[in-house]
Amino acid sequence: MIPVALFGIDAEQCEEFYAELPQILLTAGADDADYEAMLYNIEGELCLEHLGIIDEWAGNSPVVWPEDIAQEILITLEVVKYPNVALLEGLLRLDEIDVPRMASWLHFLTKVYPLYDERTCAGLRKFGLTCPYEPNDIASYGVYVALIEGFKEFAPATALPEYSLPRQRLLQLGLAAWARN
């Protein structure tokens, strides 16, 4: 049964995608040693240093926030619960913060939120799904999270081969590669 998040999906193309996904992942970047190391690079209680490490990995410019802003960021990241992203909207008013940056933080801090990626959004659109890529709109990221979760939920056991990566990362890589086809 197709999850509600995937209503309207081209089911035939989706079955084809799942059948080809193990092969797609061989060349889609699933063996990225830097990414895999980064998964285990954040340990302990959440702090600004963690965000700096994630930003460096993601290629974001370092930012020094005043203490009150830094506390707001950390508290927001602490209280947001998967799959809800609505609480993050307030952070978008801060300079240097956009959805891809927050998605990177959440991805490595929680291991469940997907990275927000334009190519993956394009891959989702190839299935007939509405998935805009809008780096300054938290609602578009909410849609993206729901769609990736739907793909995880709908995936047959044989579609996702054994990797030491989170399932949403495997799907993200596969969808981004699918967009290029």
Image (tube, rainbow, N blue to C red):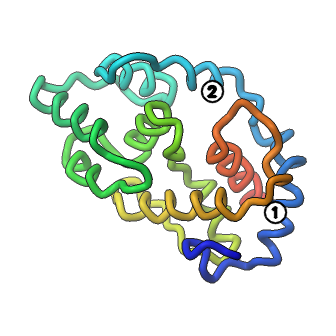
Q: Are marks 2 and 1 in contact (CB under 8 Å)?
A: no
Which residue carries the number 2 mark?
A: 35
User: In which quadrant will I find the C terminus?
Assistant: bottom right
Which residue carries the number 1 mark?
A: 17
Q: Would you say 84 lies left or right of 7 here?
A: left
The tally of labels here is 2
Answer with the quarter of the image where residue 103 lies: top left
- Residue 121 pos. (x, y %): 58, 60
Residue 36 sits above or below residue 11 on the image: above
User: In which quadrant will I find the N terminus?
Assistant: bottom right
Residue 142 sits above or below residue 108 on the image: below
Answer with the quarter of the image where residue 125 lies: bottom right
Residue 145 sits above or below residue 14 on the image: above
Secondary element under disc 1, as helix, strand or loop, is: helix
Secondary element under disc 2, as helix, strand or loop, is: helix
Q: Nearer the viewer, residue 135 or 53?
A: 53
**Residue at horizontal 42 percent and vertical 30 percent from the top:** 60
**Residue at horizontal 35 percent and vertical 54 percent from the top:** 85
Q: Which residue reaches farthest left?
A: 68
Q: Nearer the viewer, residue 5 or 119?
A: 5
Q: How packed is label 2: few (under 14 Cα within 10 Å), some, or many (20 or more)?
A: some
- Residue 22 pos. (x, y %): 86, 48
**Residue 176: mark:** none
Answer with the quarter of the image where residue 14 lies: bottom right
Structural distance between the alpha carbons of marks 2 and 1: 24 Å
Q: Would you say 104 lies left or right of 91 here?
A: right
Q: Nearer the viewer, residue 131 or 5?
A: 5
Amino acid type at circle 1 is Phe
**Residue at horizontal 32 percent and vertical 46 percent from the top:** 80
Amino acid type at circle 2 is Tyr
- Residue 177 pos. (x, y %): 75, 52
Q: How packed is label 1: few (under 14 Cα within 10 Å), some, or many (20 or more)?
A: some
